[in-house]
Image (cartoon, rainbow, N blue to C red):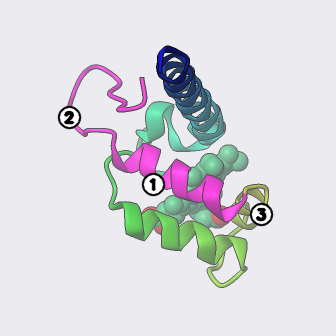
Amino acid sequence: MKALLIGAGCAALMATQAWAQDANQTRGQAATCFACHGNEGRSVGGIPPSLAGRDRAELLQTLKDFKQGKRPATIMHQHAKGYSDQQLERIADYFAKIKLGSAVAASATR
Ligand code: HEC
């Protein structure tokens, strides 16, 4: 019984670590967008558009359309192709969770 409990504790700890690693990875991937779309996806002057606080489903659909070449783009086709659909989902999630209007760079994953 004791061993079982310790085992369960280890599994929970490992799951937490995996989650933290995923969150870090997603932040790193989202950071590749900051160069053009502004820090934390808050674009300066709106070109290219801000990503922060946008609707998750809309962001994801746009990214998938870029990836499949369905939506006209200069650079985003190449950028979107570099990520798996699962990574795009996490990136869309990351930007959708940023709250607009707060002075602090808000992120649910930190
Ligand atoms: C090299 C600069 C650059 C990088 C890096 C970049 N983008 Fe873009 N993004 C653009 C440009 C320019 C457009 C306008 C479409 C085009 O010409 O490709 C755009 C358009 C978009 C749009 C459509 C916005 C709208 O409202 O029409 C989304 C969504 C988007 N990018 C998401 C991302 C994400 C997510 C990343 C990171 C994984 C990223 N971009 C990285 C330059 C960039």
- Residue 81: image tag: 3
Left or right of residue 32: residue 12: left
Labels 1, 3: front one:
3
Point out residue 98 in the picture as x, y percentages from the top left corner: 33, 39
| 1 or 3: tag closer to the N-terminus | 1
Q: Secondary structure at mark 2?
A: loop
Mark 1 Cβ inside 8 Å of ligand 1 = yes
Q: Residue at x 72, y 60 (%)?
A: 84
Q: Secondary structure at mark 1?
A: loop
Image coords of residue 47 (percent x, y): 49, 51
Image position of 102 (left or right of 41)? left
Amino acid at circle 1: Pro
Q: Is mark 3 within 8 Å of ligand 1?
A: no
Label 2 near ligand 1 (CB < 8 Å): no
Say whether residue 101 is magenta: yes
Q: Which residues are magenta?
A: 84-110
Closer to viewer: mark 2 or mark 3 = 3
Residue at the spot of label 2: 101
Q: What residue is shown with label 1?
A: 49
Write the residue at 38% across / 45% down: 52
